[in-house]
Image (spheres, grey):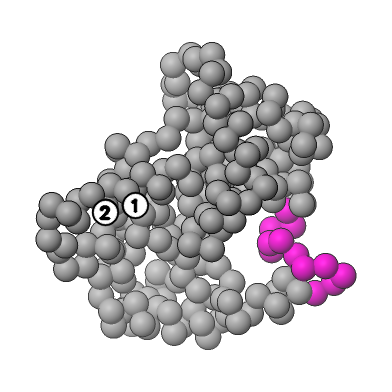
């Protein structure tokens, strides 16, 4: 018997993320009945759908009600269920702040501007948001090392953590450039984390990193060959 919701959940679990323009994903996002069915089945397994109107992908994560059971065991609260160390999580926050945060601010500003000129269409917030005009320049890997290596365990450790984050789909690395991966936009709740980054102690560090990135020398044109990273952490 054909069960599109079961198939979608199985694909999300097997593939770890799906593009927002996937046919089954789009159908769920615009059909309230299907979305309720998906949410109910995921909740029954202690999971929830990770999605944001501006994100290009969707994934599944631990439901809020189950977070303490999953992350609260042991002597300290676990940062994730991927066995990521504290320095890896810190690097993930930095990359999110440099790649996703400015993109999201531009997307929100553009949508607010559009609302002043056009009437919102039904379900418009559920459609994929074009990101062409909000693309953020990739991070120069050498600049990142210069700015954060001493704060995040040294160059060797930072390189190893970049490999770990790449392997988990948070980032993409090509020719010494770091770009957003499919899971980076879903790694943190923008509404909860953005103000903490912009108003907290990390704000000054991020602004310095952005200035350093802006002054970094231009890198060669990209091609389709991914950088081979020899040093990667085991998870």
Q: Quadrant of residue 206?
A: top right
Marks 2 and 1 sit apart, C-alpha to C-alpha, by: 6 Å
Q: Are marks 2 and 1 in contact (CB under 8 Å)?
A: yes
Location of residue 86 with respect to 177 vertically, above or below: below
Residue beneath label 1, please?
108
Location of residue 202 with respect to 77 vertically, above or below: above
Q: Position of residue 202 (x, y in %)?
A: 65, 45
In the picture, the disc for residue 134 is none
Judging depth in this view, the residue of 172 and 132 nearest the camera is 132
Q: Using residue 157 as the reference point, say whether residue 223 is left or right of it.
A: left
The quadrant of the image that shows the N terminus is: bottom left
| SS type, badge 1 | helix
Residue beneath label 2, please?
112
Badge 2, how many Cα within 10 Å: few under 14, some, many 20+? few
Judging depth in this view, the residue of 86 and 70 nearest the camera is 86
Judging depth in this view, the residue of 117 and 233 nearest the camera is 117
């Amino acid at each position: 018997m054909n069960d599109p919701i079961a198939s979608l959940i199985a694909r999300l679990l097997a593939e770890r993320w799906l593009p927002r323009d996937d046919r089954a994903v789009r159908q769920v996002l615009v059909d309230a009945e299907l979305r309720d069915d998906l949410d109910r089945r995921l909740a029954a397994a202690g999971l929830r759908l990770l999605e944001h109107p501006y994100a290009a992908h969707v994934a599944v994560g631990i439901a809020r009600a189950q977070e303490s059971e999953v992350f609260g065991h042991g002597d300290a609260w676990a940062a994730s269920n991927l066995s990521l160390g504290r320095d890896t999580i810190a690097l993930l926050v930095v990359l999110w702040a440099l790649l996703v945060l400015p993109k999201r601010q531009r997307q929100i500003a553009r949508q607010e501007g559009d609302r002043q000129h056009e009437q919102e269409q039904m379900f418009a917030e559920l459609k994929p948001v074009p990101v062409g005009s909000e693309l953020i320049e990739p991070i120069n890997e050498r600049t990142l090392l210069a700015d954060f290596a001493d704060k995040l365990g040294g160059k060797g450790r930072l390189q190893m953590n970049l490999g770990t984050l790449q392997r988990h789909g948070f980032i993409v690395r090509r020719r010494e450039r770091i770009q957003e991966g499919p899971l980076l936009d879903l790694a943190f709740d923008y509404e909860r984390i953005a103000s903490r980054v912009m108003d907290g102690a990390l704000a000054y560090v991020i602004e310095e990193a952005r200035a350093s990135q802006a002054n970094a020398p231009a890198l060669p044109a990209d091609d389709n060959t991914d950088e081979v990273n020899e040093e990667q952490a085991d998870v």
